[in-house]
């Protein structure tokens, strides 16, 4: 049976579970142990610290995993990246005390840099021909300069708020990360079929994101104009109404420009406009 390793608690846990829910995999999360079984899909869920996920996937303990690209890169285990998942976005950056003047990566020559990501940092420094001391610390890296442990830090940044509150400024954005689905690459035929099904459902969920279903009543003579405003997947659905000369037009639109479309439709006389959420789009 396919087994997927996800973070047991932390920033990726909730969204990993939400993703399973979105693709219709029911996981009994109420009595969470370290291993649980989906009730309606051939899938076991293994809950782990995110640091360990690349390793358990590369050695085959789990066939799949959901983890940040940063951990995959840092740990260096041999795993396949199946797809990006669109959440858990962050970057790993070099930051220095905000009072320091910065004029390029050579700044770091001979400096002490605190980080939990020594391998990614080492690669970056080598590429830039900079020699620095890497101090590996596992938690609260951002306090290292104030505590006198290091001159600079190399740490995860998302909004930058933590840096500012510790008197630091971001000077080099080195590595961009998001959550990814990884695979051991050693799946049985049955497991491969389950993975295909997961990917198919993920794609449906991805397509339906940010989409709205819109329907309205229109006079028949403005239908052509309405179709120009609302290009649908193939073409909009048009149904006759009991009232003569009127019809109902149904389509799918991007949520981003919904209000712009609604304004244009009202201008050509659309009435009774209904906007509904789209749960899934299956192409
Ligand atoms: P664990 O106990 O599982 O080892 P952790 O403390 O190492 O957890 P979290 O802070 O939960 O890790 O972060 C998990 C992942 O979330 C990171 O590796 C990164 O990919 C992603 N992430 C996204 N935004 C941030 C952020 N602002 N800070 C830290 N991680 C982030
Ligand atoms: Mg961790």
Image (spheres, rainbow, N blue to C red):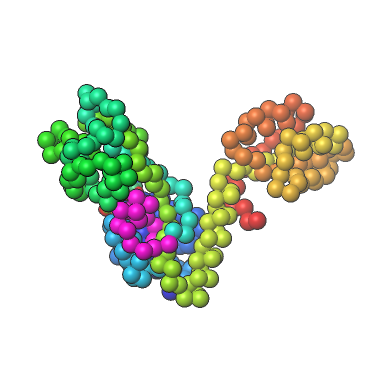
Q: Can you see residue 268?
A: yes
**Residue at figure coordinates x 58%, y 35% from the top left:** 256
Is residue 142 shown above or below 70?
above
Residue 71 is covered by the magenta coloring? yes
**Residue at figure coordinates x 43%, y 47% from the top left:** 87
Along the line of sight, the residue nearer the viewer: 5 or 263: 5
Residue, far right: 244
Instruction: Indicate the quadrant where residue 4 lies.
Output: bottom left
Can you say which quadrant of the picture contains the C terminus? bottom right
Along the line of sight, the residue nearer the viewer: 201 or 244: 201
Is residue 96 shown above or below 119?
above
Is residue 122 shown above or below 142?
below
Along the line of sight, the residue nearer the viewer: 246 or 15: 15
Residue 45 percent location from the top left of the image:
38, 65
Residue 163 percent location from the top left of the image:
27, 33
Can you say which quadrant of the picture contains the N terminus? bottom left
Horizontally, residue 246 falls left or right of residue 114, namely right
Report the number of numbered marks.
Answer: 0
Along the line of sight, the residue nearer the viewer: 151 or 29: 151
Q: Which residues are magenta?
A: 65-80
Residue, far front: 129
Horizontally, residue 231 falls left or right of residue 242, namely left
**Residue at figure coordinates x 58%, y 48% from the top left:** 208
Residue 128 percent location from the top left of the image:
31, 41
Q: Can you see residue 48?
A: no
């Amino acid at each position: 049976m396919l087994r997927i390793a996800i973070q047991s608690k932390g920033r990726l846990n909730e969204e990993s579970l939400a993703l399973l829910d979105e693709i219709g995999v029911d996981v009994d999360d109420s009595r969470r142990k370290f291993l649980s079984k989906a009730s309606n899909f051939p899938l076991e869920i293994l809950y782990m610290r995110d640091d360990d996920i690349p390793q358990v996937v590369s050695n085959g303990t789990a066939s799949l995993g959901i983890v940040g690209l940063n951990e995959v890169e840092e740990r260096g285990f041999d795993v396949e990246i199946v797809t990006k998942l669109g959440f858990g976005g962050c970057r790993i950056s070099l930051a220095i005390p905000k009072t320091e003047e910065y004029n390029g990566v050579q700044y770091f020559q001979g400096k002490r840099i605190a980080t939990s990501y020594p391998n990614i940092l080492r690669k970056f420094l080598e590429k830039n021909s900079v020699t620095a001391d890497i101090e590996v610390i596992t938690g609260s890296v951002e306090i290292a300069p104030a505590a006198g442990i290091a001159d600079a830090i190399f740490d995860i940044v998302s909004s930058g708020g933590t840096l500012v509150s510790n008197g630091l400024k971001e000077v080099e954005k080195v590595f961009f990360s998001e959550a990814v689905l990884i695979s051991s690459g050693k799946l049985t035929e049955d497991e491969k079929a389950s993975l295909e099904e997961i990917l198919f459902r993920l794609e449906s969920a991805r397509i339906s994101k940010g989409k709205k279903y819109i329907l309205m009543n229109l006079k028949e003579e403005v239908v052509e104009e309405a179709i120009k405003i609302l290009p649908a997947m193939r073409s909009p659905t048009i149904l006759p109404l009991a009232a003569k000369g009127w019809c109902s037009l149904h389509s799918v639109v991007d949520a981003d420009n919904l209000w712009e479309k609604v304004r244009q439709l009202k201008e050509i006389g659309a009435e009774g406009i209904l906007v509904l959420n789209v749960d899934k789009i299956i192409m």
